[in-house]
Amino acid sequence: MLRSALIAASRSATCRTLVEGTPVVRPIVDRFVAGPEIDDAVRVAKDLDGLLVSLDHLGEATLDRAHAEHTVEAYRLALRTLGEQGLAGRAEVSLKLSSLGQALPVDGEKIALDAARRICEAATAVGTTVTVDMEDHTTVDATLSTVRSLRADFPGTGTVLQAYLKRTEADCGDFAGPGSRIRLCKGAYDEPASVAYRDKTEVDAAYVRCLKILMRGKGYPMVATHDPRLIEIARMLAGQADRTAGDYEFQMLYGVRPDEQRALAERGLRMRVYLPYGTEWYPYFMRRLGERPANLAFFLRALAR
């Protein structure tokens, strides 16, 4: 119930105004968000030396064509900056199709595809890749269709599958082929029981089933979890599938379990940090609070201090 309430608050204009207007919140947000500008993200990426990075220019669903174009230019700037700073070898970008106009009432999917294609071109030019984020269950088919189109010209394009959706095992089978890059996460949206597992035990079991499919496949699994038990299961499954440390990677959010991120890298494993930046931090921040009780406890302790 608490998670559902926080996700609902992430969509509330009133809550957003209240939180964004509270000065004490900003230092807490800085734990999870690099800062408002690409230079902030670059600074943090450099501090994360030894770790891989995926930059996310924060922004979600837009019905404004000009805003979608602004997002494209922000990503193109980010990619040029990664190239200029010598970071493209260990930094990619993640993007949401809704921020590129996917929900526009006329030709939204085509507009988002064309926008994503321009970002992929910019990524290829500096020697890195793009991962297309997944959003709520109503967008899955459109997102996967777009990813298939992008991979025809940019085969390194990755995408995200969410284990709590009941359809995801089948999607893992479809996307476990050669060259695929799949980030497997549990899922961050408040989905109905008709399409998603709601119980933590069921979600964890679904995550392991999906992970088995990806590890046995011919693609590149990206294991997005902060759960120590699932991390060890992933390592075991990778060994059973004869994967080396370079044949898959772990991913965690910036600001969540940073010591464990370093520890995994020091064990010779590939560890990527999902690093968001930008001014549109409020929805992202509220979902992070809703995902883990420890995040909310940290937030409340900081407010109390």
Image (cartoon, rainbow, N blue to C red):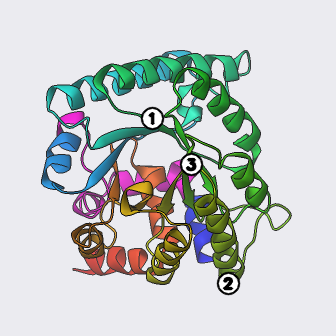
Q: Is residue 93 magenta?
A: no
Residue at (76%, 44%) from the top-left corner?
138
Q: CA distance from mark 3 to mark 1?
A: 15 Å
Say which residue label 1 marks. 130
Q: Amino acid at mark 2?
A: Thr
Residue at (14%, 47%) from the top-left corner?
46
Residue at the right extreme of this rendering: 194
Q: Comparing marks 3 and 1, which lies closer to the viewer?
A: 3
Say which residue label 3 marks. 219
Left or right of 74 in this view: 135: right
Left or right of 237 in this view: 206: right
Quarter of the image where one finds residue 7: bottom right
Q: Amino acid at mark 1?
A: Val
Mark 3 touching mark 1, by CB under 8 A? no
Residue range highlighted in magenta: 10-39
Quarter of the image where one finds residue 212: bottom right
